[in-house]
Amino acid sequence: MDNDGKTPSYIKSLVMPSAKKAQARRVWSIDLLTVWLPFFAATNTLGDTAIPADALGCPIRLGYNKDGSVKFGNTGRPVTRVAKELSQSVAMVRDNFTANLMDFAQAVAKQHKDAFNKTIQTAHVAGLPIAQHDKVELDRAVQLQIEQALKEAEAQAKAPAEAPAEAPKSKEAVTA
């Protein structure tokens, strides 16, 4: 706190709504510039990876069509992509991460079989009322949609029958 007992403005600014944060490029839902690039620069530094310097220096590349022209998306904006070497490295990290999670779960399930099974059973029992509630709500919502669709179909079917029938207009020219 400041000497006068008030919260400093830089702290207040942390808890106040601010302008929308600029959207950063993400790879596997993780920020490219603040997480992946420093991580891969560190692994290159230690010799654990050999990602080319140009991929680290220019990680976001312009997309091209097969004919070599610049690719544009449906919105008219140019398409960008992450450098192939970075994308491949992120995919390897993701695959290794997933494999480690699976190995860990299998090891715990094997070493602590009873406790693991109890945890799974407890979670299943705890989740059952939520799943049942969601099923009831979904069934109710679908039934309401069906009823609404039937009402709309009935209204459409009645509308032409209630409207006065107009004589069809002939497209042939009348000759006298």
Image (spheres, grey):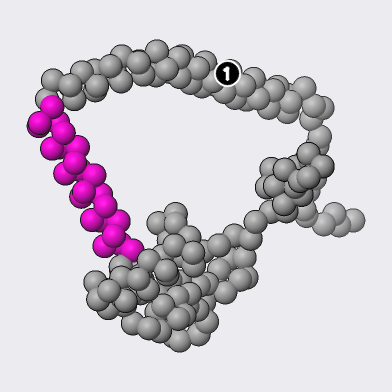
Q: Position of residue 158 (x, y in %)?
A: 70, 22
Front residue of 9 and 47? 9
Residue 113 in which image quadrant: top left
Q: In this view, does 14 lie above or below 152?
A: below
Front residue of 63 and 11? 11
Residue at 38% over, 83% down = 53
Would residue 52 appear left or right of 105 to someone viewing this image? right
Q: Is residue 47 visible?
A: yes
Residue at 37% over, 73% down = 41
Residue 23 in which image quadrant: bottom right
Give the residue at the far left of this rendering: 110
Q: Where is residue 9 in the image (x, y as percent from the top left)?
A: 76, 49
Q: Is residue 12 visible?
A: no
**Could you tell me which quadrant the N terminus lies in?**
top right
Q: Is residue 170 above or below residue 133?
A: below
The local crowd at label 1, few if under 14, some if 14 to 19, many if 20 or more residues have their Cα within 10 Å, is few
Q: Give the range drawn in magenta.
A: 90-112
Front residue of 147 and 38? 38
Provide the residue designation for mark 1.
144
Front residue of 76 and 26? 26
Give the residue at the far front of this rendering: 3
**Could you tell me which quadrant the C terminus lies in?**
bottom right
Would residue 21 appear left or right of 72 to someone viewing this image? right
Asked if residue 81 lies in the magenta stretch, the reply is no
- Which amino acid, mark 1? Leu
Residue 3 in which image quadrant: top right
Asked if residue 107 lies in the magenta stretch, the reply is yes
Would residue 61 appear left or right of 89 to someone viewing this image? right
Give the residue at the far bottom of this rendering: 68
Residue at 65% over, 56% down = 21
Q: Where is residue 46 in the image (x, y as percent from the top left)?
A: 27, 74
Q: Principal SS element in the magenta part?
A: helix
